[in-house]
Amino acid sequence: MATEKVRLTGEKATMLATLYGRAIETTFPDPIIVDPMALAAVRKLDFNFRTIKLRHDDPHSIAIRAKLFDELTTELLAAHPGASVLHLGCGLDSRVFRIDVPAGTTWFDVDFPEVVDLRKQVYPDPDVDYHLVASSVTDLAWLEKVPADRPVVVVAEGLVPYLEEKAGIALFTAIAARFPAGEAVFDAWTRTAVKLRKLQPAVRQAGADMGWGIDDPRELELAIPGFTFVDAPNIFHQLDVEKLSAATRAAVSVPFIRKMSRVLHYRFTRPPLSQLEKVALTGEKSTLLLTLYARALDAVSDHPLLGDRTALDVLQKLDVDQDRIRLGTGDDIGTIIRARELDRRTIEFLRDHPDGTVLHLACGLDSRALRIDRPASSRWFDVDYPEVADLRRKLYPEPSGNYRLIGSSVADHDFLREVPDDQPVLVLAEGLTQYLTEEVVVGLFAAATRRFRSGVLLFDACAKWVVKVSRYSPPLKQAGTSFGWGIDDPHELEELVPGIRFADEWFLGDDPDLAHRSVLALFLFKRIRALSRSLRLLEYRF
């Protein structure tokens, strides 16, 4: 007989759908999961569950996910004796009753006060060291109730997509900072899936707002100090998937669809107590964070192309809004391929000129001077704005060999007098010229060719049409900047800068690794010639 009136809205109401799904599954012959507590709760609640529009496969899907979380929780508790369980957004889930909780475990179920009140009415107290915490999981004061001297197992089923990204990152950051070690498992949706999920009847009916999508699980390694991605177990790998309809089985067999919803598993240790460096860069200076993020993301990937672990170390020292540094889909691989090709050509120059000089313009937070094995007799000069140079000094170790960091705008040519002119020079610029005007580009290169006897100009450039559309680029709009200079015919620059001659060009769209990392970018670059010719490296000799 129903006794408790249910008055839940928004994301809180979605727990009724999962509760109902587990209860229905329990009534089936040979159920995927047996949850008598869910069935009893449904009977106690004053709510018309028939209004929840579950589709034919929904009870099975809900049960498959719940079973996987039960198994993962059991495994993690066996690996961490005496741990605390942080069951975030517990809703009306009866996991603490379903699994065999080891002795010495302390269990914390955490959810909104109105949800906790409802739990108290429908569930008895578990026969374990149990605490029911009435709080939003993102109101971090509740963490003070959890002993900080033992590892934790964090379990969050059906929670993360409903969090705002900033709040979610703050939550996991606080957990990683408070406890000596632990592991976390939660389900997550890609950004595309979040948008599509909002159309699902049960979500739409509840009026829930889904706000956090995670495309690459390794994003969190960069955003949360101490977090390390372990794996993403497939929700639908179990034999229970055979209970689903043929159409659903066919859909989840497609890798793209299967990856839209994943369970993510992370391991974490308490990060060193250190003061993060606050970054206050604006305009084109702030775009150096974009390339830093791309190199760090590559460094933690399964198959890094550049392997710049220094970028990862530096990013984790910065206090920066992650929203400001996320590149668009495919942009990160383009940034890495470009950096790798510039590294390769720099190594070639130093091989041919072991006594040569590298003049690295607008070096930003690039670690090229550290990741390239330079001849002892070579010289290296990194140049960037004074505030960028100051930031580099705080974040990077001093490179070995003949190295100097100069704080100067590249538009102020006085810095050239600090660079010896007695050896061939490689004037190297990555991600610079497109932010300058033609007058500044020509003036800079002309000053360099007057200063040095011989050398190479090596830089990336974009087509003129890219300059025009750059104002619509989300990362550039976020930074408050846009491109200013583009070039279509490389020979144009020969007419503007006396003494230089065009030597070579390299197109980003021709790199074979583009095919392995970004199918969309590969398709566009291969099908649209104007696009494939739009981003390139240019090399001139003088």
Image (cartoon, grey):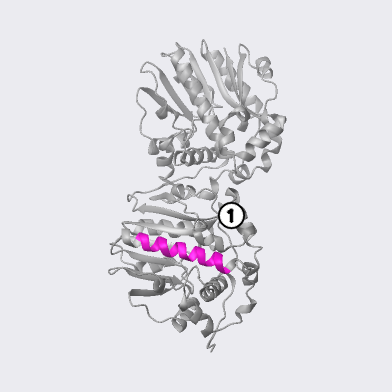
Q: Amino acid at mark 1?
A: Val
The stretch drawn in magenta includes residue 61:
yes
Quadrant in which residue 147 is drawn: bottom left
Residues rendered magenta in the picture: 59-76
- Whether residue 156 is visible here, answered yes or no, is no
Q: Nearer the viewer, residue 90 or 436?
A: 90
Residue 505, position as x, y percentages in the image: 61, 21
Quadrant in which residue 175 is drawn: bottom left
User: In terms of secondary structure, where does tag 1 sit?
Assistant: helix
Residue 332 shown left or right of residue 406 in the figure: right
In this rendering, the answer to whether 189 lies above or below 505 is below
Q: State the count of labels.
A: 1
Q: Determine the residue positioned at 41% across, 72% down.
A: 98
In this rendering, the answer to whether 488 lies above or below 203 is above
Q: Quadrant of the C terminus?
A: top right
Q: Nearer the viewer, residue 43 or 162?
A: 43
Q: Nearer the viewer, residue 29 or 174?
A: 29
Residue 118, position as x, y percentages in the image: 49, 80
The residue carrying mark 1 is 252
Mark 1 crowd level (few <14, some 14–19, many ≥20, 10 Å Cα): some
